[in-house]
Image: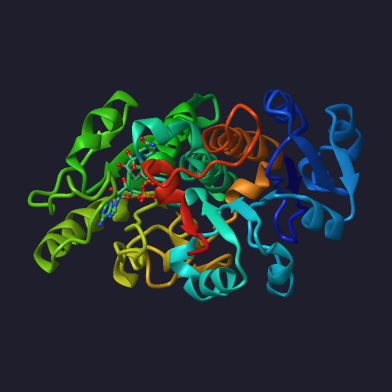
């Protein structure tokens, strides 16, 4: 079996497999082809891959000689015909790219997108949404702390006392929980909203205050994800959020509904109530944002408040992001290959069925 690792295009900095991860897969008799400079932006040289037993090759050779191709984003559309009868594995967000998925099907490609894995305990070691959201949550707080014209921690100095920063976090999924932990480590006072009451204990164990809004829609059959809420709930939630937004120096928003547009949780009027110099980091920017002013991958300044819509935060930590992504991919490869190193896609397995969203008929 030959597996290829592609170099990603700008602005991506991550790579789908690191040299250190080749070793655990080599025992399956896999030959690795790695595109020239694939790890460059993650600070990994071709020589590191060669030392781990991979062969460095130009892109076309990697694609033509590999049976399985690893990447983060989809290869170029004009390369789809080269992928016939091959399996590509990555982070493709197929629900937002249905046209591309149709073209890949027509080209005879098998597509496994690890963001489509069910969020079950068994899938945890392959869960790219979690590994990358964790980084985004951490970096969101650091970015806000960098831009805020205040300290995060409370300080009592000879030059006067500084109150702690007040941080509001909307959505306590993977990114939100990491944001809470990071903001607390920096000394901020943290308040949190989520529609899933089950996260209350986790939020409190991280030292944050959980603000409850009664009557959220039951999400128990949504595979762990949140579901859309009705108008009455959203109105009640908005009133409570408004009070917290007005006091906050930093707001980190992470609320998403799987496969749908993100809910608007912060209105323009709420932003107007914030102190000038405050910072909002909207981690739901790629799916529409949690404020009406969020622009994906841009920073908007409104009434003196910065609204950062950076959906590439994981790329700002390329080594560890690649390390975690590569580990997720390695675990998925171990699931879909037998001991002889042959590809075995068992569609009776709910993980494989969930992730393999395009397969030949
Ligand atoms: P996500 O990115 O889909 O959403 C972020 C958070 O926003 C969620 O906690 C969600 O409840 C919340 N949210 C949605 N609408 C909201 C609203 N109107 N107001 C406030 N909050 C709102 O979440 P995620 O981090 O991808 O996690 C999704 C689910 O998967 C969670 O239940 C999580 O515990 C679970 N999970 C399971 C595994 C696993 O077992 N493999 C791994 C990670 C996460």
- Rendering coords of residue 338 (x, y %): 57, 32
Question: Which residue is depicted at the point 23% across and 28% down?
Answer: 201
The answer to whether one can see residue 160 in this image is yes
- Rendering coords of residue 271 (x, y %): 36, 65
Question: Which residue is depicted at the point 51% across and 43% down?
Answer: 128
Question: Which residue is depicted at the point 30% across and 40% down?
Answer: 191
297 relative to 34, above or below: below
Question: Which residue is depicted at the point 76% across and 52% down?
Answer: 6
Front residue of 251/20: it is 20
Residue 275, image quadrant = bottom left
Front residue of 210/274: it is 210
Residue 188, image quadrant = top left
**Image quarter hosting the N terminus:** top right
- Rendering coords of residue 28 (x, y %): 68, 27
**In the rendered picture of this protein, how many numbered marks are placed on residues?**
0
Looking at the image, residue 345 sits to the left or right of residue 18; the answer is: left
- Rendering coords of residue 270 (x, y %): 30, 64
The answer to whether one can see residue 295 in this image is no
Front residue of 52/13: it is 52
254 relative to 320, above or below: below
Looking at the image, residue 50 sits to the left or right of residue 204; the answer is: right
- Please say which color scheme the image uses: rainbow
């Amino acid at each position: 079996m030959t597996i290829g690792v592609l170099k990603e295009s700008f602005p991506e900095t991550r790579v789908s497999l690191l040299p250190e991860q080749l070793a655990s897969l080599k025992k399956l008799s896999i030959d690795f082809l790695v595109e020239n400079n694939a790890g460059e932006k993650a600070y990994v040289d071709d020589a590191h891959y060669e030392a781990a037993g991979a062969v460095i090759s130009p892109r076309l050779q990697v694609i033509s000689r590999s049976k399985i191709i690893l990447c983060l984003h989809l290869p170029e559309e004009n390369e789809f015909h080269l992928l016939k009868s091959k399996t590509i594995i990555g982070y493709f967000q197929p629900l937002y790219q249905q046209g591309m998925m149709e073209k890949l099907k027509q080209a005879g490609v098998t597509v496994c997108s690890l963001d489509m894995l069910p969020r079950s305990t068994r899938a945890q070691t392959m869960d790219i949404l979690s590994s990358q959201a964790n980084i985004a949550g951490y970096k969101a707080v650091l970015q806000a702390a960098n831009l805020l014209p205040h300290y995060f921690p409370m300080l009592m100095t000879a030059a006067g006392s500084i109150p702690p920063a007040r941080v509001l976090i909307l959505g306590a999924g993977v990114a939100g929980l990491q944001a809470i932990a990071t903001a607390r480590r920096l000394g901020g006072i943290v308040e949190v909203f989520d529609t899933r009451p089950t996260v209350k204990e986790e939020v409190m164990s991280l030292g944050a205050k959980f603000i409850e809004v009664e009557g959220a829609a039951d999400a128990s059959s949504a595979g762990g994800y949140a579901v859309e809420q009705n108008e009455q709930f959203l109105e009640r939630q908005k009133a409570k959020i408004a009070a917290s937004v007005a006091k906050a120096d930093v707001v980190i928003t992470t609320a998403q509904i799987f496969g749908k547009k993100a809910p608007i949780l912060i209105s323009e009027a709420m932003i107007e109530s914030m102190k000038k110099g405050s910072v909002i980091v909207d981690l739901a920017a790629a799916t529409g944002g949690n404020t009406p002013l969020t622009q994906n991958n841009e920073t908007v300044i409104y009434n003196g408040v910065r609204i950062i819509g950076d959906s590439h935060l994981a790329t700002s930590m390329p080594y560890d992001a690649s390390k975690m992504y590569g580990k997720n991919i390695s675990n998925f490869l171990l699931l879909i290959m037998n001991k002889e190193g042959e590809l075995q896609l068992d569609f009776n397995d709910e993980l494989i069925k969930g992730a393999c969203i395009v397969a030949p008929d």
